[in-house]
Image (cartoon, rainbow, N blue to C red):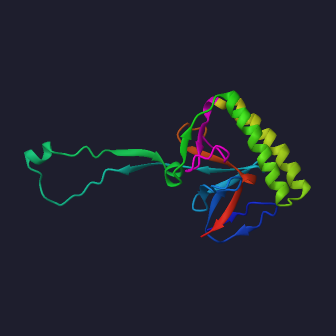
Amino acid sequence: MIIFKVGADSGLLAIPCLILDAITDSKDELLSDSYDFKEVDGVVYEADCAMIEIGAVNVDTGANASAEEAAEDLDDAATKVNNIVHSFRLQATSFDKASYSSYLKGYMKKVLAHLKEKNAPESEIDAFKKGAATFSKKVLGSFKDWEFYTGESMDVDGMVVLLNYREDGVTPYVVVWKHGLEEMKV
């Protein structure tokens, strides 16, 4: 599998890996290279999702069910879930526009501190500041269209994963902040 390397150099890796929240100690798993994702505006990664069915196992033994057995069918209904949300145990959360804006300002400060701590080049920091401001405006401008998820630990200081739908209104995709991630080779 190939993944864009998170960080200043955009070399390619051929090592399977998980993408973790780099800002908090919880290091929640947010994405992996088994999903196709692309870098957008130099500051986020977008990954298309799919709605999948889980649950409901249908076992066909080849025998005909009697009338009594048909009446005893279990209520083992399948549930449709988002494959990325389900796979990484992301937890739905909610914001109003003002609280998300406040969260985002605080989170961006943490990402900047993280970049400085790892001695990122000034050009990368400047690119992050510019790109993050632009993308933040895009999200806030279409705020009602977004869904919000935290990592499994529900760490309030961690990254909030964004979910939206493509222009077709059917295909979901998630967005994660590129500079708030780190790789874990598996």
Classify 38 as above or below 99. Answer: below
Residue in front for this viewpoint, 34 or 24:
24
* Quadrant location, the C terminus: bottom right
Q: Residue at x 85, y 43 (%)?
A: 130
Q: For residue 141, what is the image quadrant?
A: top right
Please provide percent x and percent y for residue 95: 62, 32
Residue 165 appears in the rendering:
no
Q: Residue at x 8, y 45 (%)?
A: 68
**Viewed as shown, does residue 43 lie left or right of 15?**
right
**Viewed as shown, does residue 153 lie left or right of 67?**
right
Please provide percent x and percent y for residue 79: 38, 45
Please provide percent x and percent y for residue 165: 58, 39
Q: Residue at x 29, y 54 (%)?
A: 57
Please provide percent x and percent y for residue 62: 16, 60
Residue in front for this viewpoint, 101 or 84:
101
Q: For residue 5, what is the image quadrant?
A: bottom right
* Quadrant location, the N terminus: bottom right
Which residue range is magenta in the image? 144-164
